[in-house]
Image (tube, helix red, strand yellow):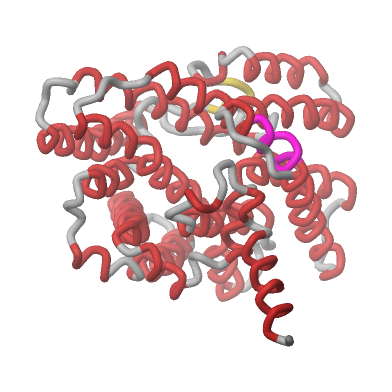
Amino acid sequence: MSGKPLTNQKAAKKDWLESWHVTPAGSQIYGYLDGIRGIAILLVLACHLLYVNPQASPTTLFIFGIFGAGTYGVTIFFALSGFLISLPFWKGKLRGTPLELKRYTWRRFWKIAPPLVLSLLILTPIYVLFYGDSGIYIKTTLQWLCGYSFFFPVSGRLNPVMWSLIVEVHFYILLPLLFLLLKKTSYRNSLIILCLGFFLIPIITRQIYEVTGNGFSLNPLIKVSFPSKLDAFSVGILIAGLHARNTLPAILTRLAPLGLIGIAIALVWKSHLGLTPGSPKALTEINNLIILVSCGFLLAFIGNPSAAGKWFLDNRLLRWFGLVSYEWYLFHQAAFFFTGALLGNAGGDPKIYAARVLIPAITSLLLAALVYRYFSLPILRGTRGETSVI
């Protein structure tokens, strides 16, 4: 008799995460991808929420520099998008079926637009309340709502983390156009062209933009010079193309855990470079390459998804973080700004410091969970013809 309740408890424990999926978990073959999202969002939060006195000891600066290197979480998000967005296109090319551009466009729209619009409607009045200058915030909000910000620089004063959305949208638009252009090109050659193009052209243009003074910036304007940030998508495109054709090397699958090790190395190295004035920019590009290769290894778990659980990527809490990561991303930094405005500088007081970090982390997570569960998820299910299980 004792075994049955235990079985039910295990079933209940297993089912709680399934109700958070857009598609019932029976179709979530690669649940570990949510775990990769979870790692990415935690890195981004560590970067934005943890801060340190610049006059602290070198050891302290180095340790916090590792957290500051969490900006690489955005790179992981981009690589994951490269995989997930390109995979259906590769499968379609393999079957010789036409691109379903209308369906693709609407799926991207309903995934990205509603939470973005809601976040703007929630956050803009609070920005005005805390900082005044309603004109600039209202103007910037309207620029985001009408899509202007995806193609032209806008003020960085309103939730600057949204810069990565600009890069995502550029990728969403560019990828299907390239597949159309390569319609009559062989699968193998298309894979080579797309991977090398997405990898090399952004790196080259990034160097050109930096020399000419038109590089990436967040202040006073969010300026994302196309296509200088698209190289991170290349590794996702590569793994998706190999996987769709069942040509992913077995050795790559076995070495997939090296992705976690590589990410750790890159975080440490970036912290070191940040404390080493005059470091050659080439070293930063090499570190960026380490992150890209590491993302490729992580995505290679696609060849053996069950093995990902041994490396905690299938952990349910981590996967849940991944599921709500987009909404969490939209709200976390603004919550940090508002908390800082309320509490002021910590001034060395550990209690105030803890409050400045924990309050925005927890409140933004709770808000993200609510928005995802009761706003984003029903919209996604409705637009994809799925029955809600909430």
Do we see residue 336 in this rendering? Answer: no
Q: Is residue 192 visible?
A: yes
* Left or right of 310 in this view: 188: left
The residue at 71%/14% (across/down) is 139
Q: Residue at x 30, y 19 (%)?
A: 177
Q: Quadrant of residue 307?
A: bottom left
Q: Nearer the viewer, residue 127 or 109?
A: 109
Describe residue 309's horizontal placement relative to residue 43 as left or right.
Answer: left
Q: Quadrant of the C terminus?
A: top right
Magenta region: which residues? 371-379
> What is the quadrant of residue 110 in the picture?
top right
User: Which secondary structure class fits the magenta region best?
Assistant: helix
> Magenta segment: does it hold 149?
no
Name the residue located 73 percent from the left edge and 78 percent from the top edge: 5
> Residue drawn 46% across and 54% down?
33
Q: Nearer the viewer, residue 309 or 6?
A: 6
- The answer to whether 186 is drawn above or below residue 363 in the figure is above
Against 314, is 380 above or below? above
Image quarter of the N terminus: bottom right
Q: Is residue 33 left or right of residue 196?
A: right
Tally the marks: 0
Which residue reaches farthest front?
A: 1
Residue 383 locus on image (x, y percent): 59, 26
Horizontal and vertical percent for residue 366?
78, 51
Query: As drawn, is 346 to the left or to the right of 38?
Result: right
